[in-house]
Image (cartoon, helix red, strand yellow):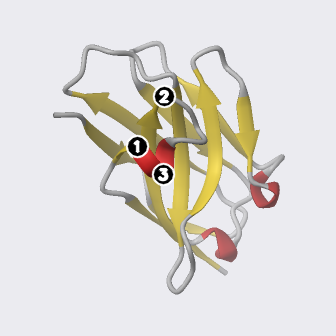
């Protein structure tokens, strides 16, 4: 059974930085796509950033220029470097993995989430 485990969340002041990590286990395949989503209280889950096996990336407009997604050297690992954090970035951040970024919400594997709280 595939398991994704996120880490790196926490409390940070506005303008600060955090780095989220995600590692998948329980599979021999290498996921083509990995991504970070977030869900704030009372809001729908949204795609923050996605990355493919060949390094193609896409970002939500709200995080462009501040967040960077990257894949690790270890198989099925992904990171999200977050700079210039804003209170509106406060959310539970989820890692997802699957055959394509577009398919993640339908058929992806998901982690349990890590809380990011940005204080003003």
Q: Residue at x 67, y 19 (%)?
A: 55
Q: Does the CB distance between marks 3 and 1 fall below 8 Å? A: no
The quadrant in which the C terminus is found is: bottom right
Q: What label sits on residue 90 in the rendered view?
A: none
Q: Regarding mark 2 in the picture, which secondary structure is present there?
A: loop
First in sequence: mark 2 vs mark 1: 2
User: Distance between the Cα atoms at labels 3 and 2?
Assistant: 11 Å
Q: What label sits on residue 105 in the rendered view?
A: 3
Q: Does the CB distance between marks 3 and 2 fall below 8 Å? A: no
Rendered position, 56 above or below 116: above
Is 108 in front, or is 48?
A: 108
First in sequence: mark 3 vs mark 2: 2
Badge 1 local density, few (<14 within 10 Å), some, or many (20+)? few
Q: Is residue 101 visible?
A: yes
Query: Residue beneath label 1, please?
Result: 107
User: Distance between the Cα atoms at labels 2 and 1?
Assistant: 8 Å
Give the percent coordinates (x, y) of residue 17.
63, 53
Q: Does the CB distance between marks 2 and 1 fall below 8 Å? A: yes
Rendered position, 3 above or below 117: above
Is 64 in front, or is 83?
A: 64
Give the percent coordinates (x, y) of residue 69.
63, 36
User: Distance between the Cα atoms at labels 3 and 1?
Assistant: 6 Å
Give the percent coordinates (x, y) of residue 108.
41, 42
Q: Regarding mark 3 in the picture, which secondary structure is present there?
A: helix
Query: Residue beneath label 2, please?
Result: 99
Q: Residue at x 49, y 31 (%)?
A: 78
Left or right, 31 with reference to 69 = left
Q: Regarding mark 1 in the picture, which secondary structure is present there?
A: helix
Badge 3 local density, few (<14 within 10 Å), some, or many (20+)? some
Give the percent coordinates (x, y) of residue 112.
30, 56
Q: Residue at x 53, y 29 (%)?
A: 33
Q: Is residue 117 visible?
A: no
């Amino acid at each position: 059974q595939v398991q994704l485990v996120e880490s790196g969340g926490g409390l940070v002041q506005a303008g600060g930085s955090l780095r989220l990590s995600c590692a998948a286990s329980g599979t021999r395949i290498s996921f083509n796509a990995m991504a970070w989503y977030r869900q704030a209280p009372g809001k729908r889950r949204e795609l923050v950033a996605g990355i493919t096996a060949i390094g193609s990336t896409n970002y939500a407009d709200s995080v462009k220029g501040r967040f960077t997604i990257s894949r690790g050297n270890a198989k099925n690992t992904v990171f999200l470097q977050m700079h210039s954090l804003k209170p509106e970035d406060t959310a539970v951040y989820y890692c997802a993995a699957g055959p394509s970024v577009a398919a993640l919400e339908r058929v992806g594997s998901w982690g349990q989430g890590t809380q990011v709280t940005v204080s003003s």
